[in-house]
Amino acid sequence: KMEMSQNGTAKQTKIILRSNDLRSKIEKQQTIKAKFNRIRSEFKQTFATIRMKECQSMLESFGPNCDASRRASEAIKDLHAVIDFGLPALVDAMCLYVLKCTEVQPAKSQEVRVAKITQNMVDVLFTLKDKLLFYERSQDADVDSVDPLKLYLKIIHFLFSHKLKPSMQLQEEYAKDWSIKKLQLPSYEILNDSIGMNEVVYNKVLERYAKIEQFRYFSKFPERLVGMKQESVSFNSGSVYIGLLTTEKRIRNGPGIEIYRNGRIYEGYWLNNLEHYFGRGISENGVVYEGDYEMRYKHGKGTCVFQNENKYTGNWDKNYMHGSGMMHFANGNKYTGKWVNNSPHDYGEMFFANGDHYVGQWSYSLMSGQGTFTFKNGDKYIGRFANSLKDGLGSLKCKSGEEFTGEWKNDLLNGNGTHTDKKGNKFTGKWRNGKKHGSGVLVYATGDIFTGTWFEDKKVGEGEYVYASGDKFTCIWKNNIADGQGVMTFKDGSVETGEWFCGTKRGQFYFKKTDGTMLIRSYKNGILVSETQ
């Protein structure tokens, strides 16, 4: 190597350095893997010891020849199967996550990053261990007290509410290998065999859990654990409770979860056997509520996702949306404002999915009272509403330049009103169902003025048309056209009288000059054909 050229030596040195970098990287990866293999091994060993103690504890509570002992042994086998099913996927996913994070971190920060994530993983794993330690020795040799269903539900509950994806932001490619869907088959069989849970109900519950982020109620509970212990209890109704009980009267007090036979679930805080303070409930039809409770009622502040996917966040009063709150509707609409007995009421603002917007008064889910409605095309109505329709005095200004002002009924002008079109023509008068109907005055942008009667947007009956030039025409009108006896008075004072037909002069007309001279004129299709004095 020393005899090679200068360029050759430099090239060889570069190759050696690259090889050293690769070796260093491989060694670091091996070190990381070794750390997690050690953590996995330690945890499994610890958990195996715990399982042995639990098995021994349960078997000692029964006589060797008791049928309950045999059933307890079978339950323990099933318990091991479920734990072995869920635990490896959990550990492997966490290890993959850590390794992935360290690959993209700068060399100087790798050790700190690895140490922090390692500690997080250990904390989560031992939290899982603590969550599973809820079996208690039976006091009356009742096999129900060691029902394996309780542990199955506990494992399922933990994996649902402490998913790695939301809590540790696990990347999708690593999360999909151990996703909640893997639990569907075994957990459904367990629930169906044990409590007869309907498949449709179970799937709704499962889907709801999968959508909701990690539950936060544990951090909100006050320290009221003196004289309480965590237990599992089966009730005659078929429901299962896992949580804290007062040791004397075995009353639900403190954090706990109860799963009912029909699929309803409540997890949160209890007071004297009632949901109280803070928790989350999932109804049998999939409605999810998370927030404050008072003596079993939703009361205070909370969020509810309904079966139709509408989502409400705000104040509650004894199971009713009441007070200030916001509703995101499944169709894309959003309402923010006051609520009374589950309905928007008093004052609020609605953003419609199509771009429309309303702000103003409400009456039990309907726009009612004074408000402003802005359409997505820029048109704006300011005025009164009733039953979500324009009703009362109001003004509609259109982006095109048109404006409607007056009395409204059933979303249309009814009564006195004014309409200005985009050309500048302005009508003031009577309206019926959005059409000119009755007496009125139409002022044209040219300065001409028509005064008369309308029927469904058309001039009818006697009307007077005054031209900007000063001429005045009075006639009978039909369907917006002069049709009948009419009089034209010119600016200089001369007058022409005759019969109009479909807007044109026809037949004999009398023309009186200002000096009193009378002329007889003959018209055909509006054309003068003869004139005599």
Image (tube, grey):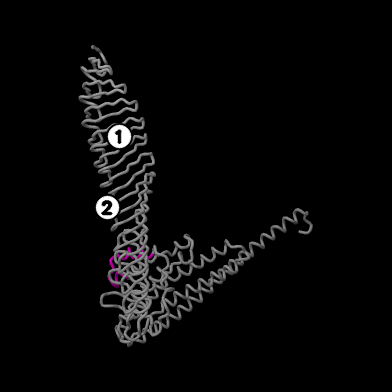
Residue drawn at x 25%, y 40% is 430
Amino acid tagged 2: Asn
* Magenta stretch, residue numbers: 191-209
Label 2: few (<14), some (14–19) or many (≥20) C-alpha neighbours in 10 Å = some
Main structural element of the magenta stretch: helix, strand or loop?
helix
In the displayed structure, 520 sits above or below 350; it is above
Q: Is residue 290 above or below residue 520?
A: below
Q: CA distance from mark 2 to mark 1?
A: 32 Å
x, y percentage for residue 44?
Answer: 47, 76
Residue at 31 percent across and 73 percent down: it is 296
| Residue 196 sits inside the magenta stretch | yes
- Residue that extends furthest to the front in the rendered view of this protein: 515
Residue 147 in view of the camera: yes
Query: Which amino acid type corresponds to the residue marked 1 in the rendered image?
Result: Leu
Which numbered marker is on residue 387? 2
Q: Is residue 85 visible?
A: no
Magenta segment includes 194: yes
Relative depth, front residue between 355 and 493: 493
Q: Is residue 176 left or right of residue 110?
A: left
The residue to which callout 1 is attached is 442
Corner quadrant of residue 230 = bottom left
Instruction: Mark 2 and mark 1 in contact? Answer it, CB < 8 Å.
Output: no
Mark 2 against mark 1, which lies toward the viewer? 1
x and y percentages locating residue 336 in the rendered image: 37, 58
